Amino acid sequence: MTDDLFHTGVSLADKAIRTVVVYLAVAALLRIGGKRGIAQLNNFDFVVMLLMSNVVQNAIIGPDNSLAGGLAGVVILMAINAVVVRLAAAVPMAGKLVEGGPVVLARDGQYLTRALRRLGLRQADLDVTIQLRGGTSVADTRLVRLEPGGAVLVRLRPEEENAERGDIDELRARLDRIERKLDALARTGGGA
């Protein structure tokens, strides 16, 4: 029994090569396949992600079902991911290669249907994102952009933006100054 726990079916070097190759292949396929993050996955994307994890499992572990082999695979996956993430953060060109750049989905209140089609995004899904950001429809937006990490950036037209706490505090301070000036004018008799 303990033999199954600690005796790996393949060498550590074999496991490392398998893990690195599968990681790079899956990362490349996801990069080519689209930018949608986990939050934007539809049901079909979710099914593909679940099945993909099962499909690549044997490619990573080979004929090894040991505890030690599984832990080694996880450690190798975490290590290569840490290297790739840090490289992408430290070297802008590597980051652009790994993550790509932002994609404009709507501009000046109009969806860019070509970009939506290319990414496999539905207007209805983006309408929900726009509503969560304070707009009612794409007509309220200046810019809607899909960021490299999968987040959707929504810039509303100025007249559609909600006032923030700082805006309200500034207006309140201005009104207080106006009231003080009016009171001073009324006391001096300059207010007619």
Image (spheres, helix red, strand yellow):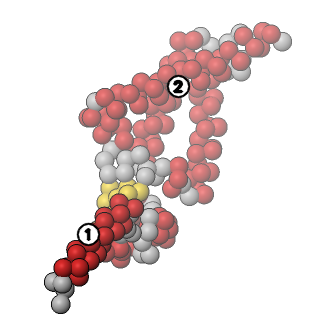
Q: Nearer the viewer, residue 36 or 172?
A: 172
The quarter of the picture where residue 175 lies is bottom left
Picture residue at 35% right of the left edge, 32% below the top? 88
The quarter of the picture where residue 86 lies is top left
Say few, some or many: other residues with alpha carbon within 10 Å of mark 1 (under 14 / 14 to 19 / 20 or more). Answer: few
Three-letter residue code for mark 1:
Arg
Picture residue at 62% right of the left edge, 31% below the top? 57
- List the single residue furthest toward the left: 190
Query: As drawn, is 164 to the left or to the right of 122?
Result: left
Residue 33 rendering spot, x and y as whole percentages? 44, 48
Query: As drawn, is 55 to the left or to the right of 105?
Result: right
Secondary-structure class at tag 1:
helix
| Mark 1 touches mark 2? (CB < 8 Å) | no
Three-letter residue code for mark 2:
Met
Which residue is denoted by mark 2 in the rendering? 78
Query: As drawn, is 129 to the left or to the right of 110?
Result: right
Residue 167 rendering spot, x and y as whole percentages? 33, 64
Quadrant for the N terminus in the image:
top right
**Between marks 1 and 2, how big is the CA–CA gap?**
59 Å
The quarter of the picture where residue 160 lies is bottom left
Which residue is denoted by mark 1 in the rendering? 177
Picture residue at 30% right of the left edge, 33% below the top? 94
Say few, some or many: other residues with alpha carbon within 10 Å of mark 2 (under 14 / 14 to 19 / 20 or more). Answer: few
Can residue 165 be seen here? The reply is: yes
Picture residue at 62% right of the left edge, 13% below the top? 10
Can residue 112 be seen here? The reply is: no
Secondary-structure class at tag 2:
helix
Q: Nearer the viewer, residue 172 or 146?
A: 172
Say the numbered circle drawn on residue 70: none
Query: As drawn, is 127 to the left or to the right of 145?
Result: right
Residue 139 rendering spot, x and y as whole percentages? 35, 77
Q: Is residue 22 above or below residue 73?
A: below
